[in-house]
Amino acid sequence: MGVSRLDIFYRRLLLTKLFIGGWGKPEDLKRIFEFRKIIGDREKCNLLVPDDYPVYITKTEEHTDCHIHDGFLISPLEHLVPGILPSESVKARFQFIVPKRWKKNRPVCIQLAGTGDHFFWRRRTLMARPMIKEAGMASLLLENPYYGYRKPKDQRRSCLKNVSDLFVMGGALILESTVLLRWLQREGYWPLGMTGISMGGYMASLAVTNWPKPIPLVPCLSWSTASSVFTTGVLSRAVNWTELEKQYAVNSVYEEEIINLLEYCGADSFKMGQDFMKDPGSLEGLLGLSEDRTSVGQRTGRGLLIGEDQVDQFLSTVGSSGTTVDSVQKGIHANSLQGKKAESDKCCRPSLHRESISFMKGVMDECTHMANFSVPVDTSLIIVVQAKEDAYIPRTGVLSLQEIWPGCEVRYLNGGHISAYLFKQNVFRQAIYDAFNRFCMKYPNLH
């Protein structure tokens, strides 16, 4: 299966760069990785937040079909890892959208935000209000750290400044979701579940791994790890690799200390490909970047000769292996240079770009790979909705969610990431209803 041309075209329209600040402070990364070991364990994580952690409602608006409550809590991450959150992100705001009349039970679905989903309008309009009309289901929309009201002043739009910001966001959302699930439980709502689209699906998945009871989960347009998103997906071309490579080269702490803190070593771990240090080409194979390029161009003794205007022509051919336009273009450029210094390369360390990609994969897997977290209590309550031609969330070269969560259901949509996001919200909602119904049939007395 190829990748969606709409996904690639849409990415080209967005010119802003991700991670312009670099990896993040080494001391912050060390604190995050140590904390990950705790929140990656359900039993340990459940001891971190008191059952009666305070949640506040500040305003209520009445609408024809629902009440919309504005509320907040102080992120528990601020107490547990002081100073790791930007000051603007410490206060976690949410909207709780409750139907005036319940159809059956009092179900609530917590919805986490996808990339670029600031404030609450998008989720409220496209998901929460229709869910009230269709199923009498309430929604709690939690705002991500670094977004909307929680966006740092020096951050441009949705572009996280540092790689470490994504991990801080994940840790905060895991703990905040736990607080809100307990609060909803105390208030008598049932059943409770979680969902999210794209990055929101990742974050909802991480949060559910730490919930000690069976719970419906519907991650949409997300997969088992974020590492492929930033190394082989189309978003990899938005990463500020120049700054990341410079910091990796200048500050030896990344290579000499932090890399030793990375624990994940599954079948798709970057550690499984450490031989790339001896053979630079092996990293491309590890990341799903390698191809028999004789099928898409003419090979010479010194590399591949092909013009940039031909990239789109064979995009669908290489796309099936998770390759992006960016990686192809960089591969073309690298091959043209490689012929000039092939002999000298044999006795030198691999390219800084390859090492930076490997390090990115390592740190992303450490903090986002689902295999690094507890398996949800009942995986049969998980319905994953994925797009067949998703260029943002490559599935090649990484463990599938079915391998990590045996018993979960995966539903595939035709098309790519952007078309599914724009036109398949009804499919996402149906998956939520199905997961909640499955829970009610299986656990009718689990209140």
Image: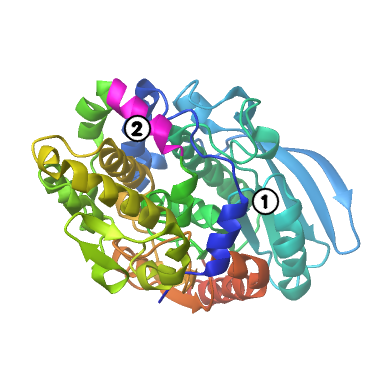
Residue 97 vs residue 34, the one in the foreground: 34
Q: Considering the numbered disc 2 on the image, is that residue within a helix, a strand or a loop?
A: helix
Residue tagged 1: 141
The rendered magenta stretch, by its main secondary structure, is classed as helix
* Relative vertical location of residue 121 with respect to residue 296 in this rendering, above or below: above
Q: Are marks 1 and 2 in contact (CB under 8 Å)?
A: no
Q: Amino acid at mark 1?
A: Leu
Residue in the image at 47% along x and 39% along y: 166
How far from the left and from the top, in percent, is residue 232?
38, 55
- Residues packed near mark 2 inside 10 Å, few (<14), some (14 to 19) or many (20 plus): some
How far from the left and from the top, in percent, is residue 405?
34, 65
Q: CA distance from mark 1 to mark 2?
A: 37 Å
Residue tagged 2: 245
Q: Is residue 246 magenta?
A: yes
Range of residues picked out in magenta: 240-250
How far from the left and from the top, in percent, is residue 421?
62, 65
Q: Is residue 126 magenta?
A: no
Which image quarter holds the N terminus?
bottom left
* Relative vertical location of residue 100 with respect to residue 252 in this rendering, above or below: below
Q: Nearer the viewer, mark 1 or mark 2?
A: 2
Q: Considering the numbered disc 1 on the image, is that residue within a helix, a strand or a loop?
A: strand
Which image quarter holds the C terminus?
bottom right
- Residues packed near mark 1 inside 10 Å, few (<14), some (14 to 19) or many (20 plus): many
Residue 212 visible? The answer is no
